[in-house]
Amino acid sequence: MKNRIVIEVWVPDLTFPGWMDRWYEQAADFERLHPEYHVKVVGQDFWTFPQKVAEAAAEGRAPALAEFYFYTAEGARDMLNGDGTPTFTSLQRAVRGRTEILGETVVLDDILKPLRDYYSLGGELISMPSVGTTSLIYANKNLLRACGLSELPRTWDELDAACRAIAKSPSRPAYPVGWSNHGTFFQQALATQGGLLVDNHNGRQGRATTVDLTSEAMMTWVEWWRRLHRDGHYLYTDRIPDWAGTFKAFAEQEVVFRITSSNDVNYMVQAAKANGFDIEVGLMPYNADVPYVGNAVAGTSIFLKDGLGDEAEDGALAFLMYLHSPRVAADRHKANSFMPLTHAAHAVLEQEGWFEQHPYHRVASDHVLGFPAGATRAPGSGDVPLSEGAQFGDFAGNQDVMTRAMGDVLARGADPLTRFAEATVEAQNLLDAYHADRLDGGPIKGTSLRVEHFATAAAGRDYSAADLEKIVKLGR
């Protein structure tokens, strides 16, 4: 028997329980179906992953498949081998219109539109979405009812009104609402209003070269957020981003509402059960004063190495299609609560009664696939809200700049427009530095390829699975 063809797959190890075990199992299952291939999965440190790939590419040993956090998508596209050639190629181009590869059904046309749109440029899917999340609002139903309320707020105005009612109630907790000071929520707030972070349509109609953190959409969001805080309704922990702190506040029933990632659904539901209260989950509130345009998604996607050769490339593509086959994708959703990424996987879960038994798990998909009830749609909108999130260099650095600016507005009374104008200058310098690095042999510096905010990295991973498990058990 000839030697097996090795497909090396590098993924960031998110350290969730069983995370890498599932990757190893998927690789082994694929090998049983395709014994001519050996899929070698390598878990890498989340924080340094892109740099390790860039270093490997420069030395001519980049993996066949590499999973990048969405902040670093442009860095992956700009990455170069030691001979100056691009490290990765377009996924759609490599598929070449085929409907199956090595017997595995090609699923590109079945990917949920918001996820496909985010990782596409000019209508071409560049990398395979592998993890998908969005922003949701969670409510303690017991506190909600005790304060005389029965429904989740859908808009910023409705959340405002709910906060005022909660503040007047004898049953009020310490604060009506809380969320982490994280770029995810800026992105969602801008997306719903049609706002942009950078020029050239968020870097989608040409490379982004100019940052603007003082747009009307941004300042409307900032001013509304500041007012909630000034009125004593919003819990700010004065840490960036402090996912664990806001989660702890919800688990300990110090807030009625928490806005956070859809990926938190498992922990949020567990915390509610452990601490003896009911939970409700809904779409992140939006600004109803303007038409609803789109939603922001986050997550990861897998890039395909260029120049693998036909057999290795087909093996890598077949493995990607296997990962997204209906049964495998549905089971992956059950294990980690990330959105099922294809309509076929969603249908499997529906047919099996998964969503009927676990209704909270379908809210994220419903969010990105449809407009909120009663929302005014932007002219020319289709049936699915747009998902045209930004694509530009040092995206994570940009987010750190804006969260620190917001921290100064909330905790230190900085003038919003003045502070965000200063942040724009700082973010512009970061983008310019990325381009200088990119033009000097491809992005390689830590700042060019960072995967999260400075503040998050400096504080350590404050949102570990172990931390959450401890908080979930608070009421036991």
Image: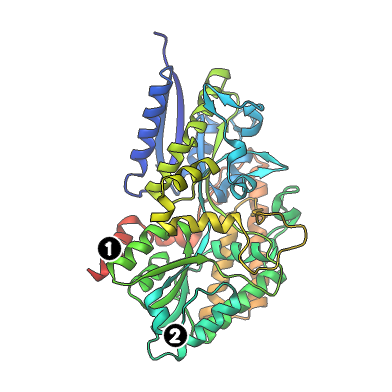
Q: Amino acid at mark 2?
A: Gly
Give residue 105's quadrant in the image.
top right
What is the image's colouring? rainbow
Relative to 453, say whether 29 is above or below.
above
Q: Residue 444 at what x, y percent from top left?
A: 56, 42
Q: Residue 113 at what x, y percent from top left?
A: 62, 47
**Numbered circle sitting on residue 31:** none
Circle 1 crowding by C-alpha within 10 Å: few under 14, some 14–19, many from 20: few
Q: Residue 207 at what x, y percent from top left?
A: 72, 48
The mark that comes first in sequence, 2 or 1, is 2
**Numbered circle sitting on residue 148:** 2
On the rendered structure, is 7 left or right of 294? left
Marks 2 & 1, CB-CB < 8 Å contact:
no
On the rendered structure, is 439 left or right of 230? right
On the rendered structure, is 323 left or right of 376? left
Please, what secondary structure does the residue beneath circle 2 have? loop
**Numbered circle sitting on residue 470:** 1
Relative to 183, say whether 97 is above or below.
above
Q: Is 434 in front, or is 125?
A: 125
Give residue 35's quadrant in the image.
top left
On the rendered structure, is 204 left or right of 150? right
Identity of the residue drawn at 42% across and 59% down: 264
Q: Amino acid at mark 1?
A: Lys
